[in-house]
Image: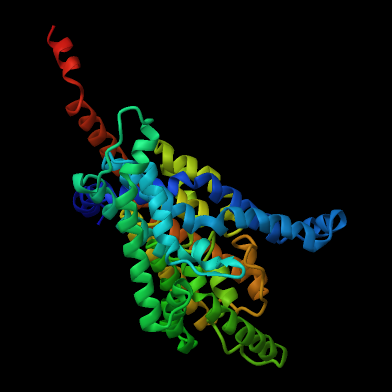
Amino acid sequence: MFKFFEEKFVPVAARVGNQRHLVAVRDGFLALMPLTIVGSLAVLFNNLPIQFYQDFMDSIWKHEVWTQWGGNMWNATFGMMSILLAFTVAYNLGRSYNKDALATGVIAVAAYMTFGTFGEGGISGLTSGTGGIFIALLVSLVSAELFTRLLGNRRLLIKMPASVPPAVAKSFAALFPAIITIGVFALVRTVISTSFNMVDLVASFYATIQEPFQSLTNSWGAGVIIALVPVFFWFFGIHGANIIEPFMQTINADSVARNMEAITAGKEAPYIITKPFFDAFVNMGGSGTTIALIIAIFIIARKNKQYNTVGKLSAAPGLFNINEPLLFGLPIILNPVLFVPFIITPVVTMSIAYFSMKAGLVPKTVIAVPWTTPPILNGILATRSWQGGVLSIVNIAVAFFIYLPFVAMAGRVQKKEEQLEQQHEETSSPKQNVEEQKV
């Protein structure tokens, strides 16, 4: 199987990974890497599940004060992610076309904001934060394509005298392409809003995706869907955890309480599918069981500078199930090499945990443990048994071996990308260098 992946999958992944638009998305996420680290630390600061830490912070400030501080950090990072991403992705795509990259990024933000919701409180949180990532990616790529093509049209060019500063001339050169690009997206927004009565497009988009999950039941099939949906959407830039969260909160409030009632009454707990079940045995390190990915990076990706650096930065947040640094830093989003393990791993770990509980090998979850509780400890606390910790270890080991060959492939893909870039630089070198070599 590994030989097949080496011979067939790696070359295809390398070609796909070098596709212009995917490279722009990757570089756009990488540009925001510092913000994802800061935002992750803010989440960890507000949710660190250590009672001593909580008591100590409460002794310094009131709980509301220091959580507001962390919240302000989150608002300035993850809370602005979609808007910033619209700029960085379009900027990199414009630069790949050797067009005005700065103007391309600015126009993409304006085009995305035509889809934003404005009210008395300003822009909605979904529009600016991680909830709008998918729409931001789509709009940034399409607007950049449209704008860069119009930017080279002589009929739309406003010629300025030679005495005019270059910055002013570039601004006027982009005027008509900007009007057309923003006008097209504003028209699309107007048609959608009036035809379908959608005031908040991002919120409507999320509500449409969330609706089918309300009818899921306590079965293995439901577990597969709940495990698959977050990672599938995350791969395409949609905040998968937010999609499934309303349903998870509903089953958490009901199923965990009923499990505890049954155990107290001396009966068997009826529910396997609960929120603590996924937090303890599936989402270890975050969506995709990425704690195993971090371990794999440390073991076999030391020579891959990008993966090694991101792995080190992601280790501390990942220990508390915060994996945005990995999602945005590698990135996992639209990464063809990591697509297979990122999708398969949570389904496999969920199935192992489900049938282990179904067979009575591990007690069912009866405690709603905070989601930031580290893996293994989370499993012990949620089930109130050592078997829960053992199950967590088994799932991490299985996930590790699933990720292992793909992390190795990532190094090979990166090597091929570097070779292609080197060849491109050599073939596009100035003629002067060629003449010097001849001499």
Marks counted in the figure total 0
Q: Residue at x 67, y 56 (%)?
A: 72
Image vertical order of residue 231 relative to residue 98, above or below: below
Residue 6, x across and y down, in percent: 23, 49
**Image quadrant occupied by the C terminus:** top left
Image vertical order of residue 238 relative to residue 251, above or below: above
Q: Is residue 90 left or right of residue 358?
A: left
Q: In which quarter of the image is residue 51?
A: bottom right
Coloration mode: rainbow
Q: In this view, does 2 lie to the left or right of 190?
A: left
Q: Nearer the viewer, residue 299 or 253?
A: 253
Residue 216, x across and y down, in percent: 46, 87
Q: Which residue is drawn at 34% across and 38% down?
A: 170
Q: Which residue lies furthest to the right in this view?
A: 59
Q: Residue at x 24, y 48 (%)?
A: 156
Residue 20, x across and y down, in percent: 26, 48
Q: Can residue 409 be seen in this view?
A: no
Q: Is residue 225 visible?
A: yes
**Image quadrant occupied by the N terminus:** bottom left
Image vertical order of residue 333 relative to residue 193, above or below: above
Q: Residue at x 38, y 30 (%)?
A: 165
Q: Residue furthest top?
A: 439
Q: Quadrant of residue 113?
A: bottom left
Residue 42, x across and y down, in percent: 65, 54
Q: Nearer the viewer, residue 340 or 379?
A: 340
